[in-house]
Image (cartoon, rainbow, N blue to C red):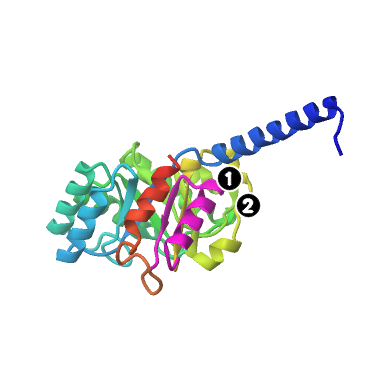
Amino acid sequence: MRYPLWVRVVGAWIAVSLTIVTDTAEASACPAQRLAVPAYWGTDAAGTTLWSRLGNATPTVGTAIVGITASGPGPVPLPEVRRVVRRARSAGVTLLSYVDTGYTGRDPAEVMADISNAFRWYGTDGIFLDQVSNTCDELGYYQALHDYVKNLNPNALVVLNPGTNTDECYVRAADILLTFEGRYQDYVRWSPTGWEYGYPAKRFWHLVFDASDAKQMRDAVTKSRRRHAGQVYVTDHGMPNPWEALPTYWRAERGAVAVGR
C-alpha cells in the first residue's frame, strides 16, 4: 500500500526523531569511560610486570586499587609498594588505597588509622572503602569516613564499594560508587535502580568477573555504558580472587573501552 505524501513525510520525521532521541539517550548514558582495575596481584616479579602493563595502558586505564592486606595498608610501610605507586602515578594512573570497613563492623578509629597510613606511606590519590553498607540508616558511618579523608586531603577521591544497588543518599559520602561487583551471568540480568542517571556517569563503577571470552567482555562493556558506569573492568578470572591478574583478553578490552570514548 502506498500512503499519501504527507503521511510518509510525517512518518519519516517521527522515525528520525526517535532515532535522535535514542542515540542521544545512549550517548548521554555514558559519554566516556575508563578502565578502573582492582590490582590485587602483589609486587613480586610477576606483579611488577602486571603493573607495567597497566601503566602502559593509559589513558584508557584511569584508576587502579592498591591492595596490600585484606584490611588495608598493613602494619608497616613497604618500599616495594612505594615504587609501584610512584611508577604507576607517573604513568598517569590514579591510585586508590584499599581499606576494608566490614559493613560498619570495623571500629571507625581503625579504619581512619588505615586511611592515614595509606596517605602517609604511599601518597595515593584516594581511598577505596570496601564491604560498604547500602542503606541510609548506616550512612553516618561512611559520611564520617568521607569527611575524614577530605580533611586529610581535600583533593583525594573517596570510593565506596557496596557492590550492589545502593540508596541514593550515599552519593553524599562518595566521589564514586561501585554499584555492581559480580559474575557476568548476574550482570546480564542486573539493572541500576534508576536514580543514578541523574548524576554524571563518572561517579559509578562496575566490576564484572567470570566473563569467559572476548564476546562476553564486549557485551559487559556495552551494558555498562548503557547502565551509566563511567568506570568499568571485566575479567575472565573467577573466585576466590578474580582480581589476581589481568584478563586474557586485556588488549581487546582496552580497545572495547577506548571505542566508547
Quadrant where the N terminus sits is: top right
> Which one is in front, 161 or 251?
251
Q: Are marks 2 and 1 in contact (CB under 8 Å)?
A: yes
Q: Is residue 2 magenta?
A: no
Q: Which residues are magenta?
A: 211-236
Q: Using the image as rendered, state which of residue 29 and residue 171 is in the foreground.
A: 29
In whole angstroms, how far apart are the C-alphas of marks 2 and 1?
7 Å
Callout 1 environment at 10 Å: few (<14), some (14 to 19), or many (20+)?
many
The quarter of the picture where the C terminus appears is top left
Residue at left offset 51%, top offset 57%? 219
| Residue 126 image point, x, y percent | 33, 46
The outermost residue toward the bottom is 240
Quadrant in which residue 212 is drawn: bottom left
Q: Is residue 229 visible?
A: yes
Above-or-below relation of 157 to 191: above
Assign a secondary structure to mark 2: loop
- Residue at the spot 34% in from the left edge and 45% down from the top edge: 60
Q: Callout 2: few (<14), some (14-19), or many (20+) C-alpha neighbours within 10 Å? A: some
**Along the horizontal axis of the image, is 173 left or right of 83?**
right
Residue 179 position in % (x across, y down): 51, 55
| Residue at (45% x, 39% y) in the render | 32
Q: Secondary structure at mark 1?
A: helix
In the image, residue 236 lies at what x, y percent? 40, 67
Q: Is residue 37 left or right of residue 260?
A: left
Q: Nearer the viewer, residue 83 or 149?
A: 83
Residue 91 shown left or right of residue 182 in the figure: left
Q: Nearer the viewer, residue 160 or 93?
A: 93
- Residue in the picture at 40% in, 73% down: 239
* Disc ID at residue 196: 1
Which residue is the site of mark 2? 193
The three-letter code of the residue at mark 1 reads Glu
Residue 44 shows up from this direction:
no
